């Protein structure tokens, strides 16, 4: 465009002209001559100014209102009647404007909410707008990088040393069916393509439940489970390919790089899982967490193949994991959970072999809140941690015991024991306190005034104990959300803002219908909380939420409570016995030592 002819910017509006002022500044900086009219000009007056100044383009703005379409269409007709239409570029902008509407009304272009000045400049210059996507370029975060794991509380460090020493001595010469299977699976994974697997598979099945044996030997599927067809797999590949081509990703974080944001999937169907993952990635999720079905966690052995089933949790098979891994954006962190159940070592092995970035291990939660025998899970967790080290997988140590009612200090004592065991074996544990309106605070009232202080106290207490990465979950704000999607989105965003204020490494968030969906969650609800979180990060920027003085008081009380629990466990000299006895969460508090796998340990 010849920049000698001016651009006329005219608000065809009684009041508003902010958008045009912003555009005028960009045009002036780009070397255009501009004329900005004040609001409340009539259409005929704008046409008269355009004719008198031989403008090259007319940019009209208009807010919402009755009869707007008719008003804008009449203006376009007037430019035609005045002999201007062939000589000028004509565009409209405003909150109600869309390109389709502008075209329908006779304009060359329409600019709606979120329009960047560069888009308008490209229109004036007659070139295709090339959005700058570098701002949304994302790199995979390293959550455990830079932490020393040095203890500030030396008393707690000494107690943890004592407890971990006793765990490792107790576990010597003990193994389990899960470890046997993992060792065989490791050999299966190393077989060359096309090699005979039958001998190893028969050895594997010796350590499996009848349900798994029937699957391999008779082709019997577990209830509500079926293989994906070749046609479904082809459509899945096509869906992923087409989605990747047209997909752009958003960044949720505004001024700060942290926290990294995870969503959780586990619809039961790999196809639906991948659709949720792609939706989450597009709307800004930095990581995804794989949920397995609860029945799978209580079954000895894994199935194989591309399998789908009709309940929550997606079946872990090498093929399912491989397909999901293949759908991920390069920047997306992928966690496969192994913190519960009878397959922990093999889960971590498969996670590492299939390219996961993280896993999840916690003996205390897995045996007190998820139904696995404490002795069995302790032996399995040691091997699971060793596989995590082998594949360089950091693992978070979740404290979901609070959902049962176990006080935070007891849950944290169990978390710290598992984390310390992980460090002793060479791992990179990540502490995962639960941001939750838990039964503990419902009874004792720490959240009767606000949801900030008690959650902040958790972070303050842990930071006063050890220099380790912290990833609240899972999800943040659990039990504060309701069936109201707006309320759920807001409370998730506020908890995310609190996590950002506290400077933690990562958070896990729910969808706005996750707690009350009554089935698979929906993509719109997934987007609700991601958008709400982005707005919260934008709102607070580098500012933050300031807890009251109670947070410090409760942090000190929590740290003292952790010390007392660890002293009791160390004095007992038997970590597994401490789990059975309720030192890390009692039956009265809602924690029950699990029964799955009881009596299944083997001597090596």
Image (cartoon, helix red, strand yellow):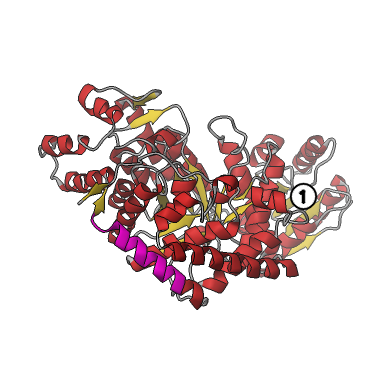
**275 versus 335 height, above or below:** above
- In depth, the one of 258 and 89 nearer the eye is 258
Q: Judge left or right: residue 151 versus residue 590.
A: left
Residue 450 lies in quadrant: bottom right
Judge whether residue 500 can be spotted in this image. Answer: no
From the image, give the main secondary structure of the stretch colored magenta. helix
- Residue at image point 51% right, 51% down: 582
Answer whether residue 57 is visible to the viewer in this image: yes
Q: Is residue 165 magenta?
A: yes
Q: Please state which of residues 297 and 87 is positioned toward the viewer in this rendering.
A: 297
The N terminus appears in which quarter of the rendering?
bottom right
- Residue 22: give x, y in percent of width and height: 73, 61
Q: Residues within 10 Å of mark 1 (few under 14, many from 20)?
A: many
Q: Is residue 345 magenta?
A: no
Count of labels in the image: 1
In the image, 292 versus 135, the foreground residue is 292
What residue is shown with label 1?
61
Residue 473, how many percent across, how many down?
A: 55, 53
At x 86% / y 58%, what residue is drawn?
A: 38
On screen, residue 352 versus residue 466, left or right, reads: left
Local secondary structure at mark 1: strand
604 lies above or below 515:
below
Tell me which segment is drawn in magenta: 158-173
Picture residue at 35% right of the left edge, 39% below the top: 316
Q: Is residue 365 left or right of residue 302?
A: right
């Amino acid at each position: 465009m010849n920049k000698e002819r001016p651009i006329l910017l005219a608000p065809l509006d009684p009041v508003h002209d902010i958008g045009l002022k912003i555009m005028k500044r960009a045009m002036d900086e780009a070397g255009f001559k501009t004329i900005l009219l004040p609001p409340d000009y009539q259409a005929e007056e704008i046409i008269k100014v355009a004719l008198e100044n031989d403008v090259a383009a007319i940019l009209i703005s208009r807010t919402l209102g009755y009869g707007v379409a008719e008003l804008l269409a009449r203006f376009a007709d007037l430019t035609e009647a005045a002999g201007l239409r062939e000589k000028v570029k004509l565009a409209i902008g405003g909150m109600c404007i869309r390109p389709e509407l502008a075209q329908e009304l006779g304009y060359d272009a329409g600019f709606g909410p979120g329009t960047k000045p560069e888009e308008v400049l490209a229109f004036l210059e007659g070139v295709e707008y090339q959005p700058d996507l570098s701002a949304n370029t994302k790199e995979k975060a390293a959550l455990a990088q830079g932490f020393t794991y040095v203890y500030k509380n030396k008393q707690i460090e000494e107690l943890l040393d004592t407890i971990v020493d006793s765990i490792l001595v107790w576990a010597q010469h003990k193994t389990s069916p899960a470890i046997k299977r993992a060792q065989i699976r490791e050999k299966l994974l190393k077989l060359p393509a096309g090699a005979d697997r039958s001998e190893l598979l028969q050895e594997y099945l010796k350590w499996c439940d009848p349900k798994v044996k029937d699957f391999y030997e008779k082709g019997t599927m577990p209830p509500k489970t079926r293989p994906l067809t070749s046609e479904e797999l082809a459509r899945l590949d096509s869906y992923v390919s087409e989605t990747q081509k047209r997909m752009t990703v958003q960044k949720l974080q505004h001024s700060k790089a942290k926290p990294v944001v995870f969503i959780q999937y586990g619809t039961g169907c790999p196809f639906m899982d991948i659709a949720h993952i792609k939706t989450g990635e597009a709307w800004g999720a930095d990581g995804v967490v794989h949920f397995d079905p609860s029945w799978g966690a209580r079954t000895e052995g894994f199935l194989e193949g591309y399998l789908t089933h009709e309940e929550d949790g997606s079946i872990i098979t090498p093929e399912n994991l491989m397909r999901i891994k293949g759908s991920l954006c390069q920047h997306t962190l992928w966690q496969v959970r192994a913190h519960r159940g009878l397959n922990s070592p093999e889960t971590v092995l498969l996670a590492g072999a299939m390219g996961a970035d993280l896993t999840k291990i916690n003996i205390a939660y897995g045996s007190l809140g998820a139904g696995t025998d404490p002795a069995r899970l302790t032996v399995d967790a040691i091997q699971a941690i060793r596989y995590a080290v082998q594949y360089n997988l950091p693992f978070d140590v979740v404290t979901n015991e609070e959902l049962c009612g176990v006080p935070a200090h007891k849950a944290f004592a169990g978390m710290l024991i598992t984390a310390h065991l992980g460090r002793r074996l060479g791992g990179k544990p990540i502490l995962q306190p639960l941001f939750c309106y838990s039964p503990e605070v419902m009874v004792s009232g720490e959240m009767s005034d606000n949801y900030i202080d008690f959650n902040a106290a958790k972070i303050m207490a842990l930071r006063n104990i050890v220099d380790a990465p912290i990833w609240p979950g899972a999800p943040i704000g659990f039990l504060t959300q309701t069936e109201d999607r707006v309320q759920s989105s807001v409370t998730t965003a506020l908890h995310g803002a609190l996590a950002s204020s506290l400077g933690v490494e990562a958070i896990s968030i729910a969808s706005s219908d996750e707690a009350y969906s009554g089935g698979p969650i929906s993509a719109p609800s997934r987007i609700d909380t991601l958008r709400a979180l982005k707005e919260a990060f934008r709102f607070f920027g580098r500012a933050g939420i300031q807890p009251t003085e109670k947070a410090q008081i409760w942090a000190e009380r929590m740290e003292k409570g952790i010390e007392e629990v660890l002293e009791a466990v160390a004095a007992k000299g038997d970590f597994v016995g401490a789990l059975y006895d309720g030192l890390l969460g009692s039956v009265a508090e809602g924690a029950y030592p699990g029964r799955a796998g009881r009596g299944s340990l083997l001597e090596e």
